[in-house]
Image: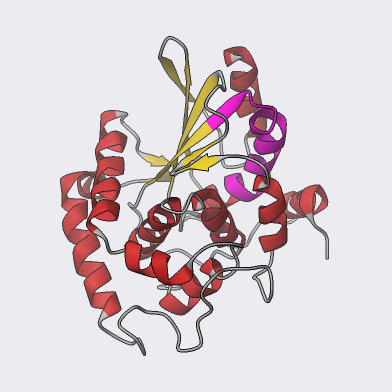
């Protein structure tokens, strides 16, 4: 099985089968979804998560009866070892990846069930990590936005909960490497557990508890407010900020547009 750079090249040669309808350059939000991205999202998060936790689960927590306590690469999902290697040695603090001294801040708005984000995160982002983040030139702030549907909210909550353990990027990357088709209800508790147990060091009972916490709900609501303030209408959306605070959006043509992102990063540096 190919790994690392070879596996990404193989995926470029044979694009993932999951695509958004109409194949826009980014996954676009409807006006209604943009409204939900603000204050209404808090209600949606509460309703969906409560309903999910109280139905179809052998335990209130959503964990399987034989759940492991801490994630590892033993019996991990495909791509998990590549993800662990990708982020090894890079500091993570909440939803920020990289060294505080980095000159450029790259802010990325992503939806965890967005297939165009999946292309970006699995085929472009690993190169950005190697070229700019590991070299301490750029740090990344992740904004997990939920606008496509219920699975978006579940993925957002779990990613923000993983951020409490400074493993948001690992969790999101494993998820994207094993993403299902959008709006099919694929992001079940069993799937989320399998993703979590594939992240070495992730405390699994804690993430399943934290995903429904008040702090995660507040952070999810803030992401929606930030998206509205920055006129974000789809994912992935990338902004670059350089001292003393100049911010500009990177005009990605599609999820595989590494050329444009590299051009803007080099100009910012």
In the picture, the quarter occupied by the N terminus is bottom right
Which of 17 and 151 lies nearest the eye of the viewer?
Answer: 151
Colouring used for the render: secondary structure
Question: In the image, is residue 138 part of the stretch drawn in magenta?
Answer: yes
* Secondary structure mainly formed by the magenta segment: helix
Q: Which residues are magenta?
A: 120-139
> In the image, residue 237 lies at what x, y percent?
45, 36
In the picture, the quarter occupied by the C terminus is top right
Q: Is residue 30 left or right of residue 62?
A: left
Question: In the image, is residue 155 part of the stretch drawn in magenta?
Answer: no
**Whether residue 76 is situated above or below residue 245 in the rendered picture:** below
> In the image, residue 7 lies at what x, y percent?
78, 55
> In the image, residue 95 lies at what x, y percent?
44, 43
Extreme-top residue of the structure: 244
> In the image, residue 172 lies at what x, y percent?
52, 55
Q: Based on the displayed image, in which of its 4 quarters is residue 210 positioned?
A: bottom left
Q: Residue at x 34, y 52 (%)?
A: 146
Q: Based on the displayed image, in which of its 4 quarters is residue 77 positioned?
A: bottom right
Q: Is residue 13 left or right of residue 190?
A: right
Q: Is residue 17 left or right of residue 30?
A: right
> Is residue 73 visible in the rendered structure shown here?
yes
> Is residue 19 visible in the rendered structure shown here?
no
Q: Residue at x 42, y 80 (%)?
A: 63
The number of numbered discs placed on residues in the rendered structure image is 0
**Whether residue 269 is situated above or below residue 96 in the rendered picture:** above
**Whether residue 90 is situated above or below residue 42 in the rendered picture:** above
Q: Residue at x 38, y 69 (%)?
A: 208
Which of 31 and 154 lies nearest the eye of the viewer?
Answer: 154
């Amino acid at each position: 099985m190919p790994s690392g750079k070879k596996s990404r090249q193989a995926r470029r040669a044979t694009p993932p089968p999951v695509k958004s309808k109409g194949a826009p350059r980014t996954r676009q939000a409807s006006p209604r979804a943009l409204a939900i991205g603000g204050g209404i999202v808090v209600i949606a998060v509460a309703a969906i998560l409560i309903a999910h936790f109280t139905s179809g689960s052998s335990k209130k927590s959503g964990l399987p009866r034989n759940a492991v306590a801490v994630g590892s690469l033993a019996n991990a999902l495909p791509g998990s070892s590549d993800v662990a290697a990708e982020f090894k040695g890079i500091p993570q603090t909440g939803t920020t990846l990289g060294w505080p001294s980095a000159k450029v801040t790259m802010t990325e708005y992503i939806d965890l069930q967005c297939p165009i984000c999946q292309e970006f995160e699995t085929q472009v982002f690993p190169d950005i990590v190697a070229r700019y983040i590991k070299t301490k030139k750029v740090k990344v702030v992740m904004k997990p936005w939920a606008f496509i549907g219920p699975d978006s909210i579940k993925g957002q909550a779990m990613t923000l909960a993983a951020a409490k353990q400074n493993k948001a990027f690992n969790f999101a990357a494993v998820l994207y490497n094993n993403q299902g088709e959008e709006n099919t209800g694929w992001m079940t508790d069993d799937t989320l557990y399998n993703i979590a147990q594939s992240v070495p060091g992730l405390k699994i009972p804690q993430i399943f508890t934290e995903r429904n916490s008040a702090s995660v709900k507040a952070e999810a609501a803030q992401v929606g407010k930030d998206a509205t303030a920055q006129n974000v209408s789809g994912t992935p959306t990338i902004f670059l900020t350089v001292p003393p605070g100049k911010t500009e959006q990177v005009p990605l043509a599609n999820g595989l547009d590494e050329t444009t992102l590299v051009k803007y990063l080099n100009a910012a540096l």
